[in-house]
Image (cartoon, rainbow, N blue to C red):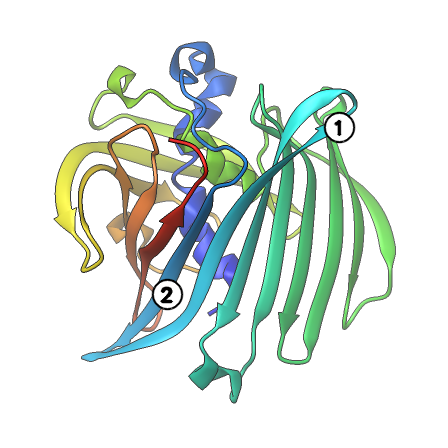
Amino acid sequence: MTLKHLLWFFIFTVQILSLSAQNRSKDLLALNQFKAGEYVRYKVIYKFSEVWVTAGFVSFEFTERAVDNKHHTVCIARGNTAPAFDIFYKVRDEYATVLETSTCRPKFFLRRVNEGRFKIHNDFNFLHDSLKVIAEMQDSKNAHRMDTMAIPPNTQDIVSALLHCRSLDYKKLDSGQQYNFPIFLDNEVFQVGVKYHGKQSISTGYGDYNCIVLQPILLTGRIFSEVDKMRIYMTDDERRLPVYIESPLKVGRIVAVLTKYKTNFK
């Protein structure tokens, strides 16, 4: 299980923000809950038949910096396999996004993948006014190369996507609403969608939460076989934290559970 696979989960918590391209962003972008000093950690559990195995861990850490005299939020996502899996296939992945805080649009996206003997070193520069991405890419199979790719308005990277949902005012959404939006991943633009399913209380084993429930509707890709059965549970409070995510895979099932949360703001 790679960091990219788990991050697909969090992509879908974004969705509604991309409605910004559909004339409602000014109404929905009422919150700004991700701030420097926040740290969250998830345990990734893989289930096959009746066996549950801790496959790895994913963390998100937030800092801030100035870019072109504008305030930017930096989010670094790190993923690694559990020690028992390192013997078979060691994963040490790191993704990072630098996004303009006022617009929630990515400025830079970095991808560092170390999975077994395979490595990826990619840097992406988003030029939203020009609707393009300048990519600098290198991996174990391909030499260093540069490319420029066209993107639709308000395109997100795989990490910046998750931040958007935490900036939304869900009181202005109706249960059953569905939205579509673009995500840039693996040098392609994917159209995905999500449906808002109202609220539900859950217990994860690490805490009890009142949650907002989200359901992915469409994924143009190769990871999940039954995306319509995926559910994402995000706290219905000012933090907007994904606390529990579950989905079928082509073989087995994957679960991500929030196990640690700390911050230097209230």
| Residue 24 appears left or right of 171 | right
The image quadrant where one finds the C terminus is top left
- Residue 67's mark? 1
Q: Which residue is mark 2?
A: 44
| Residue 172 appears left or right of 6 | left
Q: Nearer the viewer, residue 180 or 36?
A: 36
Q: Earlier in the sequence, mark 2 or mark 1?
A: 2
Q: Nearer the viewer, residue 201 or 247?
A: 201
Whether residue 222 is visible here, answered yes or no, is no
Residue located at (34% from left, 40% from top): 241
Give, as a three-letter code, the residue at label 1. Answer: Val
Label 2 Cα neighbours within 10 Å, binned few <14 / some 14-19 / many ≥20? many
Residue located at (47% from left, 16% from top): 22
Task: State the SS at label 2.
Answer: strand
Residue located at (22% from left, 57% from top): 206
Q: Which quadrant would residue 13 be assigned to in this image?
A: top left
Q: Nearer the viewer, residue 134 or 165?
A: 165
